[in-house]
């Protein structure tokens, strides 16, 4: 059962708690508390989605009219 | 303005691809973050990893079994409604997760609600949706979506790890819920349409007017099916699916046993983490390259080569000293990690047509997931018995070589729609 759950934890991306601990050891040296990463990823995700929707709708009408 | 004009002339299908890559980014990141919460749940619910395992295992089974059902729904109703429902329910599922009081509710919410909901926005379903928008650039389109998955695993797991420390796990899963509800749902709602014909376009943005530059002449492949059961009577679907099961076996075994192998070989934690980062980075880059290449050569040759390269990566783990093997695997294995997914889906669509590609891809995904899970268990048991992964990895090398040969044996030129007569007329002249 434990093997199965480990598979479940990883089959969408090989990150388990131990590996995550290893990654954090490396990242902490660069990112400190990680606030910059959280804000950066969050803001970029939302802004890129908004931009994508805005431009995408314009392109759809443009493609359609052509 | 020139940029505006360039954007206006861009084929709309690419916006669907970018939108679905963003949804996949969120989905993979959110699901891969499960590992971040395990210790928190252990403490808060005063439970064991085994109980959390049981909850997650239910999700594994339900997620795998739901894949062909979602595929069938896409074949019948189109991708828009399935993806929209999947994204909405996933957001609701993560909100429910933020309120769970015990591990029993974890089993219900993660194992049933979220596993079922995320099945609707899995890569199998997103790639099948874009398959209807592209023919010539199908491989590139699908690979781009998969690169969202690679980036999601790489960025969002550390993201949630830091967030848990600052605001706790309940608020972290709420942030993911909001991500699906204020990013995922609007993106799917605004951008995704079932097919280019629905808004008066053609696949790849080409015209249907005879004699016009870049005109598409619709062709069908000899094995095009109107029901998925018909496909099971032919050999290529079995070959593609068998190779895909090996894909599941190889990726799952290394994914689950990577840490255990590294510890058993005396690899330091810093090296292990950096090699993982390198693998993820190479994976994302290689995906785009393989996608681009797959639209310019036979996909079966590329698919077989991807399996062959992965076999070489596993061989490095066995025959090289551990540290060398680790770095060699990060580069070689990373180059082939997710590339088999878009190649498999696009090859299936090329041979069997688009009417039933959702169900066929769903069935292959189900076999991929369950076959992988079974072999993960076998690999763990074998390690417990003999104390080494060498035999397991050698077994994977043999299976991957078999997958390579099987993939190469698919008669793509004879059966794929890409090679049926002249598909593209360019101003009167034809090109195949």
Image (cartoon, rainbow, N blue to C red):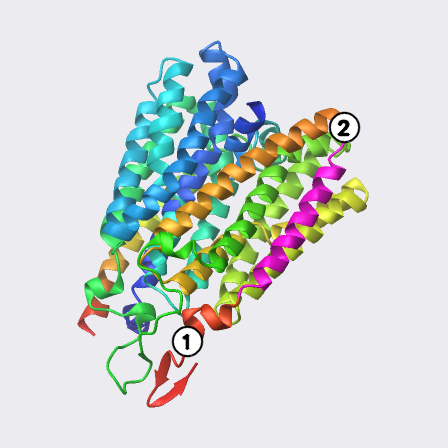
Question: Which of the pair B35/B306 is nearer the observer?
Answer: B306
Above-or-below relation of B219 to B381: below
Mark 2 residue element: loop
Contact check, label 1 and label 2, Cβ < 8 Å: no
Residue span colored magenta: B387-410
Q: Is residue B409 visible?
A: yes
Q: Residues within 10 Å of mark 2 (few under 14, many from 20)?
A: few
Question: Residue B331: horizontal and vertical position, in percent?
Answer: 66, 52
Query: In terms of secondary structure, what is the magenta stretch mainly?
Result: helix
Above-or-below relation of B370 to B146: above
Question: Residue B39: horizontal and vertical position, in percent?
Answer: 52, 19
Above-or-below relation of B418 to B72: below
Q: CA distance from mark 1 to mark 2?
A: 52 Å
Residue pictured at 40% horizontal, 26% vertical: B111
Residue B420: mark = 1
Residue pictured at 48% horizontal, 24% vertical: B37
The answer to which image quadrant residue B59 occupies is top left
Residue pictured at 50% horizontal, 32% vertical: A8
The answer to which image quadrant residue B175 occupies is top left
Q: Residues within 10 Å of mark 1 (few under 14, many from 20)?
A: some
Is B223 left or right of B401, judged from the image as shown?
A: left
Please tell me whether residue A66 belongs to the stretch shown in magenta.
no
The answer to which image quadrant residue A41 occupies is top left
- Subunit of label 2: B
The nearer-to-camera label among 1 and 2 is 1
- Subunit of label 1: B
Report which residue position mark 2 lands on: B387
């Amino acid at each position: 059962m434990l093997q199965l759950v480990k598979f479940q934890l990883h089959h969408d991306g090989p990150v388990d708690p131990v590996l995550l601990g290893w990654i954090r050891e490396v990242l902490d040296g660069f990112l400190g508390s990680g606030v910059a990463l959280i804000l950066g990823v969050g803001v970029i995700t939302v802004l890129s989605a908004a931009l994508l929707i805005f431009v995408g709708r314009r392109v759809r009408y443009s493609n359609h009219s052509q | 303005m020139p940029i505006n004009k360039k954007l206006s002339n861009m084929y709309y299908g690419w916006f669907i691809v970018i939108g679905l890559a963003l949804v996949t980014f969120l989905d993979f990141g959110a699901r891969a973050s499960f590992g971040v919460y395990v210790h928190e749940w252990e403490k808060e619910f005063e439970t064991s990893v085994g109980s959390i395992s049981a909850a997650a295992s239910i999700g594994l089974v339900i997620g795998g079994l739901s894949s062909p059902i979602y595929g069938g729904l896409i074949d019948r109703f189109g991708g828009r409604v399935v993806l929209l429902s999947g994204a909405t329910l996933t957001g609701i599922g993560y909100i429910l997760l933020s309120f769970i009081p015990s591990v029993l509710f974890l089993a219900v919410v993660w194992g049933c609600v979220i596993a079922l909901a995320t099945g609707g926005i899995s890569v199998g379903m997103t790639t099948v949706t874009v398959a209807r928008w592209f023919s010539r650039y199908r491989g590139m389109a699908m690979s781009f979506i998969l690169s969202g998955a690679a980036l999601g695993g790489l960025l969002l797991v550390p993201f949630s790890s830091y967030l848990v420390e600052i605001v706790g796990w309940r608020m972290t899963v709420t942030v993911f819920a909001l991500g699906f509800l204020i990013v995922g749902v609007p993106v799917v709602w605004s951008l995704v349409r079932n097919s280019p014909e629905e808004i008066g376009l053609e696949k790849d943005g080409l015209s249907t007017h005879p004699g016009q530059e870049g005109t598409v002449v619709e062709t069908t492949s000899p094995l095009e099916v109107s029901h998925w059961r018909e496909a099971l009577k032919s050999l290529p679907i079995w070959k593609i699916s068998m190779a895909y099961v090996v894909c599941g076996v190889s990726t799952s075994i290394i994914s689950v046993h990577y840490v255990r192998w590294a510890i058993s070989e005396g690899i330091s934690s810093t090296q292990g983490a950096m090699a993982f980062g390198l693998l993820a980075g190479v994976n994302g880059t290689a995906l785009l390259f393989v996608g681009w290449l797959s639209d310019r050569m036979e996909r079966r040759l590329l698919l077989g080569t991807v399996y062959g390269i992965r076999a070489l990566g596993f061989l490095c783990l066995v025959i090289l000293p551990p540290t060398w093997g680790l770095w060699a695997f990060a580069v070689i294995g990373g180059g082939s990690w997710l590339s088999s997914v878009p190649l498999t889906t696009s090859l299936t669509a090329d041979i069997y047509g688009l009417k039933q590609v959702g169900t066929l891809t769903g069935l292959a995904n189900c076999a991929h997931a369950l076959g992988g899970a079974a072999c993960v268990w076998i690999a763990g048991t074998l390690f417990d018995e003999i104390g080494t992964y060498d035999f397991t990895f050698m077994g994977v090398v043999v299976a991957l070589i078999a997958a390579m040969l099987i993939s190469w044996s698919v008669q793509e030129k004879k059966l794929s729609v890409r090679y049926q007569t002249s598909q593209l007329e360019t101003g009167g002249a034809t090109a195949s």
